[in-house]
Image (cartoon, rainbow, N blue to C red):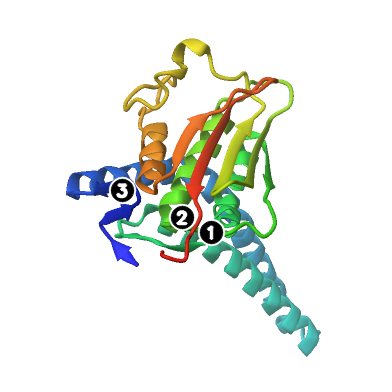
């Protein structure tokens, strides 16, 4: 279902052209932020393809090849090409300017997909990314790319909040909480100072020297537009925890 107006119980948000442009700009900024890590990661399959192609050429030139060896080389090249294509496709989807599309969404599947991109950034920053997804989680009615944008923004925000020492983990987990699908992004960083908690979701508020102050504000706006809620959860141990609650799909949706 494609729409520019979310119609949900108790909420109706008209996304005008300026709002759509802002969301698109935020996606481009996030994609650009991840681009260096993604290009570095894609060098590996590209270099492997080049090496295997050279192996095939050398075998053919030496006349010592067998059909099995050549087929194995082609399979390796095909696998590397598929990996690189998959990464590029995921990045393109995140940065595309497109109408919002509400559809029954498998939240766990959407998180696994965006986890590929988040995992590349985690590897670059020396952070362990863990997914803990509840089995048989009911579907939500949501725009896949927008929800993935919000989750990716929260995950990258957690990675960048890490200190230089100690445990460096970001955990994305899902669960069922009443009539909601619950998604939590938590980290093992220093946590959030009480003095700034009330301002974290304000547009243009940032504690990062090069931050835009739009990431968390847009993530909350995305979740609000789905009739959900994004908030900060207190933790008994160090680190921050952001929780998204999305209403489950109903028979009327």
Measuring from the top left, give residue 231's x and y in whole percent.
Answer: 48, 31
Q: Residue at x 30, y 54 (%)?
A: 6
Q: What's the distance in space between the residues labelled 3 and 1, CA to CA?
A: 19 Å
Which disc, if any, is residue 91? 2
Q: Quadrant of residue 101?
A: bottom left
Q: Residue furthest top?
A: 195
Q: Residues within 10 Å of mark 1 (few under 14, many from 20)?
A: some
Q: Are marks 3 and 1 in contact (CB under 8 Å)?
A: no
**Viewer-side residue, 193 vs 28:** 193
Identified at 58% across, 46% down, the residue is 178
**Does 64 sit above or below residue 34?**
below
Mark 3 nearby-residue class (10 Å; few <14, some 14–19, many ≥20): some
Please name which of the two marks, 3 or 1, marks the residue nearer to the observer. Answer: 3
Residues under labels 2 and 1: Cα distance? 6 Å
Q: Residue furthest bottom?
A: 67
Mark 2 Cα-neighbour bin, 10 Å: few <14, some 14–19, many ≥20: many
Q: Do labels 2 and 1 touch, CB within 8 Å?
A: yes
Establish if 166 lies above or below 156.
above
Q: Secondary structure at mark 3?
A: helix
SS at badge 2: helix
Residue at x 38%, y 41% (from the top left corner): 224
Residue positioned 55% across, 50% down in the render: 117
Describe the element under mark 1 as helix, strand or loop: helix
Q: Which residue is mark 1?
A: 87
Quadrant of the drawing holding the C terminus: bottom left
**Labelled disc at residue 24:** 3
């Amino acid at each position: 279902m494609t729409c520019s107006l979310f119609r949900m119980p108790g909420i109706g948000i008209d996304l005008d052209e300026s709002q759509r442009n802002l969301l698109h700009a935020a996606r481009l900024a996030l994609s650009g932020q991840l681009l260096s890590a993604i290009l570095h990661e894609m060098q590996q399959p590209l270099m492997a393809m080049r090496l295997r192609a050279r192996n095939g050429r050398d075998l053919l030139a030496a006349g010592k090849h067998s059909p099995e060896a050549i087929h194995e080389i082609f399979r390796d090249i095909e696998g590397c090409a598929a990996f690189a294509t998959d990464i590029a496709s995921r990045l393109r989807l995140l940065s595309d300017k497109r109408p919002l599309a509400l559809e029954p969404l498998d939240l766990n599947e959407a998180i696994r997909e965006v986890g590929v991109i988040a995992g590349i950034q985690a590897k670059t920053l020396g952070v362990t990314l863990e997914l803990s997804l509840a089995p048989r989680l009911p579907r939500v009615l949501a725009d896949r790319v927008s929800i993935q944008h919000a989750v990716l923004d929260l995950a990258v925000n957690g990675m960048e909040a890490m200190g230089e020492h100690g445990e460096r983990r970001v955990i994305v987990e899902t669960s069922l909480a009443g009539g909601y699908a619950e998604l939590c992004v938590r980290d093992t960083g220093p946590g959030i100072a009480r003095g700034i908690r009330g301002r974290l979701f304000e547009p243009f508020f940032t504690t990062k020297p090069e931050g835009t102050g739009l990431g968390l504000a847009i993530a909350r706006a995305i979740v609000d537009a789905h009739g959900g809620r994004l908030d900060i959860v207190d933790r008994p141990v160090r680190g921050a925890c952001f929780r998204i609650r999305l209403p489950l799909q109903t028979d009327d949706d």
